[in-house]
Image: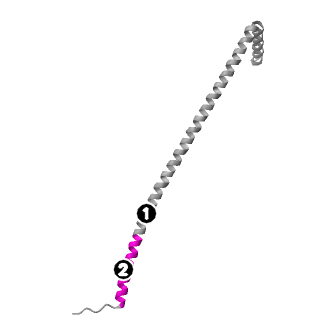
Amino acid sequence: MATAPKTTDDTLSATGNEELAAIKQDMHQLKADLAELLTAMKTRGQNKAEALGQDAINTLHDAIDTLNQRVNAAKEGVSEKTRATVDQAEQVIERHPVASLLAAFGIGFVLAKLFSKN
């Protein structure tokens, strides 16, 4: 038995099926590549977010350190001024003990009158 020679329609159908199979394979590969690309983009985005977060934390720590230094410098300045004022007050009291005692008594008397209920 002899087989019938292939017709043009059979050839076109076989070629169409091969092309369809190739397109399906290309679509499958495209889908896999897209999934891989999305995963890579997600990972990169997470890494960038973590880096930005760490940068923000580092900047915050630097700001806190700077603020601590300024507070410590201000405390030292206030302490020095307070010591100088106390020293001056002690010198005035040593030079004028009676006047200092009378001034303290007068101030106490005035404050007592201001804060008394009667």
| Residue position marked by numbered label 2 in the rendering | 18
The location of residue 107, given as percent across then percent down, is 77, 14
Residue 76 vertical placement versus 87 (above, below):
below
| Residue 11 picture quarter | bottom left
User: Residue farthest to the left?
Assistant: 1
Circle 2 SS class: helix
Q: Residue at x 61, y 34 (%)?
A: 67
CA gap between label 1 and label 2 equals 26 Å
The location of residue 101, given as percent across then percent down, is 75, 8
**What amino acid is labelled 2 in the image?**
Glu
User: Which color scheme did the rendering employ for the protein?
Assistant: one colour
Circle 1 SS class: helix
**On the rendered image, what quadrant is the N terminus found in?**
bottom left
What range is drawn magenta here?
Answer: 8-28
Label 1–label 2 contact, CB within 8 A? no
Q: Residue at x 69, y 16 (%)?
A: 86
Q: Residue at x 40, y 75 (%)?
A: 23
Residue 72 tag number: none
Q: Main secondary structure of the magenta part?
A: helix
| Residue position marked by numbered label 1 in the rendering | 35
Q: Residue at x 40, y 72 (%)?
A: 26
**On the rendered image, what quadrant is the C terminus found in?**
top right
